[in-house]
Amino acid sequence: MRKRLRERLRYWFDGTMDRGTPALIGWLGLASLALITLVSGVVVAFAHKDTEDNGGWLGIVWMSLLRTLDPGTMGGDTGRPLFLILMLTVTIGGIFIVSALIGVMTTGLEARIQQLRKGTSRLIEHGHTIVLGWSEQVFTVIAELVEANQSERRSCVVILADRDKVDMEDEIRRRIPDTGKTRVICRSGNPLQRGDLELVSPDSAKAIMVLSPVGDDSDIDVIKVLLLLNSRTWSGTRPNVVAAVQSSANLAAARLAAGDTALVIDADDIAVGLIVQSHRQSGLSTVFNELLSFVGNEIYPWHEPALAGSTYGESLNAFELGVPIGVHRADGEVLVNPDMDTVLGPEDRLLLVAEDDLLIKRAATRPPIVRSAVATAEVRPPVPDRTLLIGWNSRAEKIIEQLDLLVKPGSVVDIAAPRPPREEANRELRNLTVGFKYCEPTRRPSLEALGLDGYRHIVVLTDDGIDPGRADDRTLVTLLHLRDIEIQLGDPYSIVTEMHDDANREVAQVTKADDFIVSTKVISLLLTQLTENRHLHAVFADLFDPQGSEIYLKPAAGYLTPGAEANFATVIEAARQRGETAIGYRLARHSDEPPLYGVHLNPSKTAPLTLEEDDTVVVLAED
């Protein structure tokens, strides 16, 4: 019976120990109380004179407490031997108890600090933007959100990823040292777990962005996160949810998982569209990077009641700052580069390219049009293309399919790779003839044997079968060879290059390739734009779709007489007469100078402008 009672007491004591630091502090407090009570009781019972000399039993209790907490206090004690021995006893006991207390509190405090550093506490924010997942894209996203929120008094970006909170914060500070008014908060947790998802307070968020993790099954993780968000019961207004899938085959499943209110974009299709369009429009990647980024010019919906009843064509020169590119109807329909006779309704909004919505300004008077400078020469019709596709990856087949939709009949695309592609790459093509040439892209003799002077356009694809960093290194070597061969041949072709890492694009600028397509950066920029304004999805979907209005860089001679002094308002008018919307121009003499590469969007409409034969005009057109 006694043994069972002892076991029960020990089990109860062990249970209290499991409660952590507060329980340990409580037991040490009880031990101190017991020691003080015992010693004080002995002194009162057996040392009457010393008790009377020190204020009675309350004085003895106070003395015992002080000696328990501070051993040095007993240094001045006087009295009989028994009293001194008892004070020494309580002092020695106090040394052990206080030492243990300090150790327990230190350990508990360290554990609490570590717990806080893990970032597992629940967030209390409102109107914040949540980023779920971690990849190289997160740095572009944060930088863009910081730029977008510069005019806000306070803003917050929250990142939830299955990584150490301190490591994430250190990496963000290293890559983005200045976040301005935007607070960046990291939380450690798995976005695939509903409980971890609640750490970032999704109910009060403004927008949620789902990033694809690194790995072969990245789309599976994105789809599961979208399922969790879609099945969740929201206590307030559902935030704007945007995501991207890497494979077009997973797009339907992802959109089904996301529901009707979320936006899911096809990263693979957008990358292919940008490569295909850039291969025919040198400088196009720079235009898209600026329109997608919050640095420089971007697209804003703008309501201008004074233009109600006028036509879209009449609105093109109606703004001192800002260039219209389309109309957002009151019923939600988006028209990019609509017919010039399209009438604007009282509730319609214009889509304007501008540096900031605060800078959009209606012109007091229409800018002058220099009609004598408008080109009257016939524009040369497009001719069949000869394109060389160096390398092969999972996007190559779709690139060929989209090229077939854009080029004239009789065009040729030759694939230069170590191995011939599958026969499916040549199926159902109407305008293209596909050929194959053996080539080792990093070997110069192999490139020279291709007869590069016979091609107008060269597209260099990265190898997605090896490490992305190593693939970019191989692409850099290929670019250096191509550029040197081009110099010797007299600049006969343009080069469009696909890369994985934007840092490698900066290194590759020495090769002076015409366009660098960094698909991860483009997708990051697009997702960030959509978190701020989901209505822009229809605009960019039209711009990336080969069937809709696209951005072209067309010869300036088709709009202004080369060498004639005019202004950009005249260029806009010349484009309007052709059913096109002009938004900028590119100067050939500055085409190798970063970061703009000669591209100027939304320029002054009244400043003097002279375009030469080699310059181009940036327009939105059907063809």
Image (tube, helix red, strand yellow):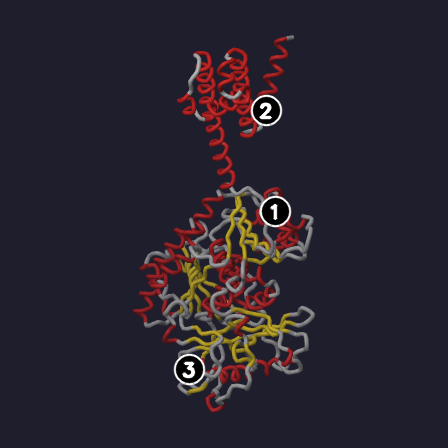
The residue lying toward the viewer, choosing from 278 and 314, is 314
Asked whether the residues under the numbered discs 3 and 1 touch, taking CB atoms below 8 Å apart as contact, a structural biologist would say no
**Closer to the camera in the image, 405 or 337:** 337
Graded by Cα atoms within 10 Å as few (under 14), some (14 to 19) or many (20 or more), the crowding at tag 3 reads many
- Element assignment for label 3: loop
Asked whether residue 396 appears in the rendered view, the answer is no
Label number found at residue 16: 2
Q: Is residue 431 above or below residue 420?
A: below
Q: Position of residue 180 (x, y in %)?
A: 47, 59
Upstream in sequence: badge 2 or badge 1: 2
Instruction: Name the image quarter holding the C terminus.
Output: bottom right
Q: Is residue 21 above or below residue 197?
A: above
The residues bearing labels 2 and 1 have C-alpha atoms spaced at a distance of: 41 Å
Q: Quadrant of residue 76?
A: top left
Mark 2 lies on a secondary structure that is helix
Is residue 15 found left or right of 391 in the rendered image?
Answer: right
Instruction: Kindly identify the amino acid type of the residue bearing the numbered disc 3.
Output: Leu
> What kind of element bears circle 1?
helix
- The picture quadrant where one finds residue 508 is bottom left
